[in-house]
Image (cartoon, rainbow, N blue to C red):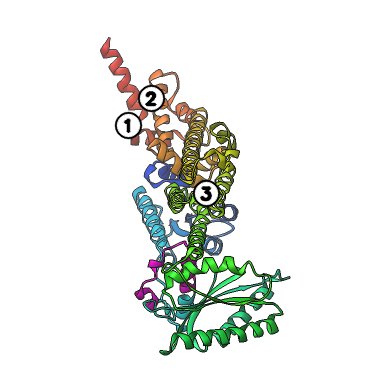
Amino acid sequence: MFNLLIVDDEKIIREGIHELLSMEENLELNLFMAASAVEAQAILESRKIDIVLTDIQMPQMTGIELMDIILERWPHCKVIFLTGYSQFEYVYRVYKHAKYILKAEEDSKIIDAVKETIEEIENDFLIQQIVLDSDILIQQKKKIERLTLLKDIVEGFIPVSSLTQNLVKKLDIPFDIEKELYYVVMHHEFKNFDSYEMQMQLNENIHQLLEKYYFDLMRGISIQYNKNFRLIILQPKKLITVERSIATLKGISELFQKAYMKNMNMSVSLYIGSKPMIFEDIVSRFHLLKAKLMMHSEEVLLLDSGIMNEGMNKSDSNENHVVQGNLLYSKIQMIDYYFENSDDEMVIAVIQEAMDNYKNTVSMHDLSAVSIYSTIASKLITYINQIGLSTEMCFKIGVINLYNLTLHNNWQEAFRYLISITNTIFELKMANVEKQGKDVINRVKIYIKENLNRDTSLDVLSDYVDLSPEYLLRLFKKREGQTILHYINELKIVKAKKLIVDGNLAIKDIATELGFTSAGYFSRFFKSKTGMTPQTFRENTESNRINSH
């Protein structure tokens, strides 16, 4: 839908163009009229206008002057000039800035100009590839892209497999993904600052210290997970032994801690990997080490054994279980995102993964499983409340039962219960959306039928049901299979035929009864829909009635 403003000080021309464009149902235009450029300016201040079709020579302000105001207020607005002036100088001036149509030209020229303009606007919607000439801008763009990608991987938003060798090269990621990497997990105090500038200064100081102590000796990158944690990925610049690499990391980490305290007056704790790993294992390890670092209230410098799967004893197995739980917890945080996007399949997939993760867990007191289950349950309850389904869900289930693990014999049963609740939420939501949409459309249709001779413009109808014009237009077309304008016009034709056949009203009175501004406009409208004028239709109907007797 596009908003089109017609500006002309001659009423007959202004209303004639309005009537002409009103009959073009496929254009889906929301039409406005102004009797002067000053009046048009007021409209432009109150709403977005996509196309202005304006006369040039008008009292108080010309169309050329109006165009300057239009482009200042709505830079993407397109202007079509309608003028009776055919002198070369005037036309040339207009032609340089916008389309123009002579008033003497046929109606089809106006319609074609509007169609072309709509096509131009739709083409403008397409994103143009920005060419960056500056090396600095290119590097800044790559930096943002690589940090976003790596953070999304660590948070679990996208799989580790997304980080291919080609992508590493494209984004200038400063390590070889096909080789093993070293890692440091950093935990620093979160401090509320009085201003955002102070927070920015802290981040800049951290960056400078990382560059000075870590990235001066090794290639690498720092991934800020949140305000408390960073994951530092490193790779030696030249071939050296593992022992020497670890010794180097321990030494520079000690210096980093001291420099951090001296510059920021805050402590920082570090976990250093004692052996290199592939990137995927480092991401898994990070979530375990986060939990471990939170157990220390004082500044610590620890060496991580880095044991993942091979040769695990019971303690190692428990640790791996925690790793998997932490990774799963990161994925569960994405449930909010899936809810916001109405992606029920992904919500179910995450809960299914939780069910698979704990299928061999016997104890219903396993804290990792309890934590995962409770987090999912809390997110379901939050979502139920957000979308206003509290009452319906209370009747379907006792919402409090979501936290009652004693109802379930095992974790498989518990997570299946969450999947069932999730399906119920989405079913009720869809039912509500369908009902609300149906109610809105019914209200609109009733309003149109009761006000067929009044203003039934899209703006009036959208205000009536408290929806945006664009959304109402899409909703109506989706549910009714036709545009609102087509629906209104069909009702007018049906009622017009009935009034014509009754024969009690003159054609001009029928035009008024149906909300047309003139009998001429009504006649053109009726003929465009039926192939004959109202008078001819009346005569044919009367003739058929006489012949039937």
Task: State how far apart marks 2 and 1 are (Cα).
Answer: 10 Å
The earlier-in-sequence mark between 2 and 1 is 2
Label 3: element kind: loop
- Residue at the outermost front position: 313
Mark closest to the chain's N terminus, 3 or 1: 3
- Residue lying furthest left in this view? 547
Is 536 above or below relative to 205?
above
Residue 252 percent across, percent down from the top left:
57, 86
**Residue occupying image coordinates x 52% and y 27%:** 450
Question: Tag 1: Cα neighbours inside 10 Å, few (<14), some, or many (≥20)?
Answer: few
Q: What label does residue 530 carry, if any?
A: 1
- In this figure, which residue is indicated by the disc labeled 3? 363
Q: Residue furthest top?
A: 549
Q: Position of residue 545 (x, y in %)?
A: 30, 15
Q: Are marks 2 and 1 in contact (CB under 8 Å)?
A: yes
Residue that label 2 marks = 497
Tell which of 296 and 286 is nearer to you. 296
Look at discs 3 and 1 and give the one toward the viewer.
3
Magenta: main secondary structure: helix
Assess disc 2: are there few (<14), some (14-19) or many (≥20) residues with their C-alpha within 10 Å of its C-alpha: some
Residue 68 x/y as whole percent: 54, 65
Label 3, label 2: how far apart the Cα atoms are: 77 Å
Disc 3 residue type? Ser
What residue appears at the point 71 percent right and 68 percent down from the top-left corner? 192
**Tag 2 secondary structure:** helix
> Which mark is first along the chain, 2 or 3?
3
User: Is 108 one of the magenta-colored residues?
Assistant: no
Region of the chain picked out in magenta, as a range: 144-170
Crowding at label 3, few (<14), some or many (≥20) Cα neighbours within 10 Å? few
Instruction: Name the element at disc 1.
Output: helix
